Amino acid sequence: MSRKVKSRRVITFSLVLVSIILLSGLVACSSGGTGTEETVQDQVDSTGNTLSDIKTKLNKANIYGATVSPDNGFVAYIQGNSELWEGQLYLWQVGSSEPKLIPRVNDRICKLLWSPNSSYLFVDIGTSVQREGIIVSAREDKSIGDFGYTGGPCWSPDSKWVAVGMVNSSIQPVTPTELNGVQDLVLYNIQTKEKKVIVKATSEYDFVPREWLANGNLEYDKYYYRGQAMEKLIYSAKPDTASAPEVSNASASAPATRAYFGIWIIKKEIPTPNVTCLSQEQIDGYLGQEIAVNDKQVVTSKGTIKNPVYQENIWTNTDLYNNWRMQFSSLGVTDDTVTEIEIANYQNDTENGIGSGFILTNDKRLYTNIGGVLFELGK
């Protein structure tokens, strides 16, 4: 550093005092824009330690992305090139005299997202749809995990999980995209680094997390490759214990309030123009059978769907016609909408798709699709 300053010193000034002033200015200028460990003390005066002091001292051209933790105990920021969004990550704890450089987190950092408990920081890095996520521990001043992702992130209310989209390269979308595959909905565990796929994408659609609500419900979006309208869906998870979260179908405060929960009996076939591979004998054989639907499983005489993920979609008369070639009037529906319930994680667990989806009217009548045949259920 001293050789650099000497090479740039202006020697035409004769006063020693002026030389000292110039030297001081050159030292300050030589530290800008690199985001390295040796420059942080030149860039930030470390005499103050309140949150207000820290914010004031970070008001510099080569510092960007300053983000305060929810408990106001930390400020995360990037020092480097604010125009290119490239630099080094620092954490400054309120009450400390100086910030801490976080090793090996120096890149094109685009977003900083604190966990609700202020213990962790999600660092978003990348230049394309395929991103890198780094988890930083604020207490340890270091990164504790990293992974590739494509959508999100969303912190769980207990700060133990992050919901993201992750590429599944084993399936290719019907429409080519920048990604080499489709995008599953995944939960990443901060401590164990487990990646739990909760909703699998197909070649027709994939998923992007949107918001993890305080009641534990994760809101996410379903995007179709062929241009259909995006759907807003909900994944319900029980509070985490030592293992991965279990799939649930209602909030913890009201575990059995869904209108389609219960033991249902297949009452009758509803005639539709749709073509089915079932014979009339097979259709008649389903009549009188039971389907038990709850937050743990869907039980039928032809298989069980464990830990079902229920997706509730609002259907209009047009949606019903597009799927079943029939109008609301054929079902005696006088309202403007019905609710379509899809088991998002269904993996051919039952014969002919029995129990994999339902249609619920506003007056609590339930229908189901078995092998392309629409049946009315009753209790």
Image (cartoon, helix red, strand yellow):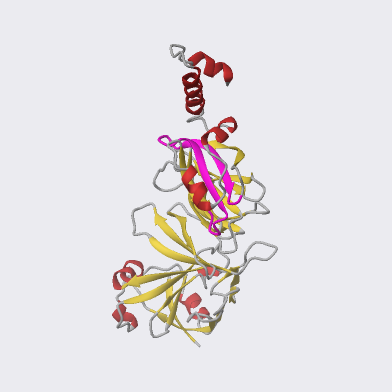
Residue at the spot x=55%, y=36% of the render? 106
Residue stretch rendered in magenta on the structure: 69-95
Q: In this orientation, which residue lies closer to the viewer: 288 or 300? A: 300
- Residue 340 seen in the current view: yes
Residue at horizontal 41 percent and vertical 64 percent from the top: 232
Picture coordinates of residue 350, whole percent (x, y): 57, 69
- Residue 85 falls in which quadrant of the image? top left
User: Where residue 111 appears, x then y in whole percent?
Assistant: 47, 46
* Quarter of the image where one finds residue 47: top right
Question: Where does the image place residue 26, in percent across and percent down from the top left?
Answer: 48, 23
**Residue lying at the far top of the rendered structure:** 12
Q: Residue at x 44, y 48 (%)?
A: 173
Q: Is residue 71 magenta?
A: yes
Q: Quadrant of residue 307?
A: bottom right
Q: Is residue 244 magenta?
A: no
Above or below, comparing residue 225 to residue 273 in the picture: above
Front position in the image: 293 or 56: 56
State whether residue 8 is above or below residue 251: above
Q: Residue furthest bottom?
A: 379
Judging depth in this view, the residue of 192 and 75 nearest the camera is: 75
Residue 186 shows up from this direction = no
